[in-house]
Amino acid sequence: MSPKHPLRALLILFAFSLTALMSCSERVEPPAVTDNAAPTPTAAVALEEAASDDNPFFDEWDTPYGIPPFALIRDEHYKPAFERGIEELRHDVAAIRDNPEAPSFENTIEALELAGESLTRVADTFNNINNTDTNDYLQELDVEMTPRLTREWDAIYLDEEIFARVNTLYQQRDTLGLDQQAMRLLELTHLDFVRQGAALDRESRDRMKEINARLSELSTVFGQNLLKETNGFELVVSVEAELGGLPDNMIGSARAKAQSKGLENGWVFGLDRGTFEGFMTFADNRDLRKQMYDGYRARGGQGGATDSRDEISEIAHLRAEAAQLLGYEDHAAYQLETRMAKTPEAAESFLLEVWQPGLKRAGEELADMQAIVQAEGHDYLIEGHDWWYYAEKLRQQKYDLNEAAQKPYLELSNVRQGAFYVANRLFGVTFEPLENVPLWNPVVKPYAVYGPDRAFLGVYMADDYARESKRGGAWMSTYRSASNIRGEEIRPIVTNNLNLAVPAEGEPTLLTFDQVETVFHEFGHALHGLMTQIRYPRFSGTSGSPRDWVELPSQFMEHYATEPEVLAIYAKHAETGEVIPQELVDKVRAAATHNQGFKTTEYIAASLLDLKWHDLTPKQAAAVEDVVKYENEVLAAYGKPDMIETRYRSPYFAHIFSGGYSAGYYAYLWSEILDADGFTAFKETGDIFNPELAQRLKENVYEAGASRDADLLYRQFRGQDPTIEPLLRIRGLN
């Protein structure tokens, strides 16, 4: 078992925990609901009681590498395991509270780190399975357990006696003889308690409990509403001629999806992001593009039982109220206190610094695309459902680059080998396929991971394909985090999760360059989790890292995807094995800044919207009667063009309303300052694998986790503070 911070265990059930973002994940969407019927309440109780007799969570796991014994775990095992885990956590916490000895680092701070092992184990497993192979029963259990775990969270953080012990140690911290990592754990633990309301009066603490419980319910409802609306949309095409422009592999996937639904003579397209963007990019039929576009935009705001606009208003109001109870002006100020940006004003100022160049470039792109429309003899103006389509035409025109021509060279297994190559060249890390280990789904590919001295680093598991039981997007998560408390070294079990379309039988999985970057992105998160060398699980990999730091390890890896040396490793024709021609590589690199005006604008629009939802006071939030109207007013004030849709509209903005990124969506671009500046350092040496820089990167980013302040870690790697110029240059905005 992996000891972890117990309070992280309590939060693991929130739809998108920190490790499941890494999220990156920036491509996060909610889990999908299947049609599997949940057991009736009576049947469920009977199953759960019976599960107590053979519950694998009640035994030690003798599986290879401690991987969960997935074949033995049944749905009905989870609830009894949660129940027992909660009781054990309460027992562990009571032992800390009631300890007659004076508070010490070991019997209070370290004991909190070790508390709740069994709850952590079931929560980690449940969270991952609920995101990758969910069903109605698991969804209902999520709804039941999330507020219960929130109450356990509050019971610890708002416990006067526990806080008294923590506070005593904090006041004595300079006399305790703690090393750097132990001191940081003490200081952050104390800060956690204060920020959760431990120092408030009793009445305010009681109100915080009410707010937290309600917020947990609302975020869960938001996520589940969204997943139902996402899965509920199907674009059915029955006439083959209407598929003009779509790649063969996409058509094949749509036919397979139709057949799985009993439609022998049609094609079915869903709203997962990969399918959506592919359809919008290649479909010649403008009416069908509009149907797909409107279906995507309408999610969460169509009225009925799965409309989330009321939940959004209440979430904004409650977050604002909680922030003011804690002495902050608003939720954004509360959130950013512990992040690199420090203040909402700093985050907004940074976004606006990139916003204006992005808008300018988007205007130039629009003019170029409108010229293509006119040249084709059409008299309509570019609208939102046209942008992807004409952006691809513009790319072909300007760079003689057709995305369909690239895809045969971008086969999934080869691409992953390219990512492995980069990890080996930079850090000496190797990946070896595993056989005969437990898997939660047959499509999962497992690997043992080793350092340069053959030291075992952990297990890496890749779950690449979309399915109705799996939430959309791409993310990294963990079944077990790294730690080394009291000499017991625990190595992590890390997963990368994608949502690639399942190819037709016998066909290879071909990617776009955007999808290649996603593979490298999530792999960077995985390396952060696998390579971490820390004592306390609080600091493991992505755990505890500020949002605007945690995307650095992932986004840094993206830079290598289009480097010629790396392309030569993985960009090989799926049928012939031919390495991608240099001519095509040159075109890809020349087109690297294509459509960056659009991409920058849609992303920053969502980031600004996020900040504006969370700089509201309780009174201001209560005054928002129409969520969509408020959103439109916010974006209009910043000058967002109508034909560029914000990346996420409020009713399906899962990152901020159910995914842990509230007042933090700007973090992807903030981290891009760091990764662009950091990769520039390598480029300036003339060696993208420069050994000296790679060693500093390894020690201060990938191995360090959250064990030191992010600003310090970056300076120790780079030797200076970052500048924004490399970001603007790489995006082609300067």
Image: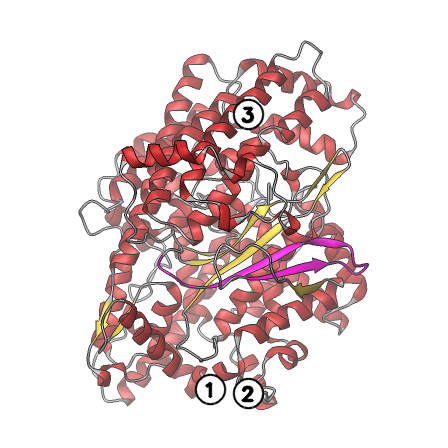
Task: From the viewer's side, name the closer residue of 301 and 519.
Answer: 519
**Residue at mark 3:** 88
Circle nearer the viewer, 3 or 1: 3
Q: Position of residue 693 (x, y in %)?
A: 77, 62
For mark 1, give the secondary structure.
helix
Checking the image for residue 405, the label placed there is: 1
Labels 1 and 2 touching (C-beta < 8 A)? yes
Tell me where residue 535 sits by quadrant.
top right
Residue 166 in view of the camera: yes
**Residue at mark 2:** 584
State left or right for residue 492 relative to residue 283.
right
Q: Earlier in the sequence, mark 3 or mark 1?
A: 3
Q: Position of residue 573 (x, y in %)?
A: 55, 86
Tell me where residue 253 sits by quadrant.
bottom left
Give the Cα separation between the discs numbered 2 and 3.
59 Å
Given the image, on which type of amino acid does mark 3 rest?
A: Glu
Circle nearer the viewer, 2 or 3: 3
For mark 3, give the secondary structure.
helix
State left or right for residue 80 relative to residue 194.
left
Given the image, on which type of amino acid does mark 1 rest?
A: Ala
The span picked out in magenta is: 445-468
Q: Earlier in the sequence, mark 2 or mark 3?
A: 3
93 vs 589: above or below: above
Query: Could you tell me which quadrant the C terminus lies in?
Result: bottom right
Given the image, on which type of amino acid does mark 2 rest?
A: Leu
663 vs 288: above or below: above
Residue 157 in view of the camera: no
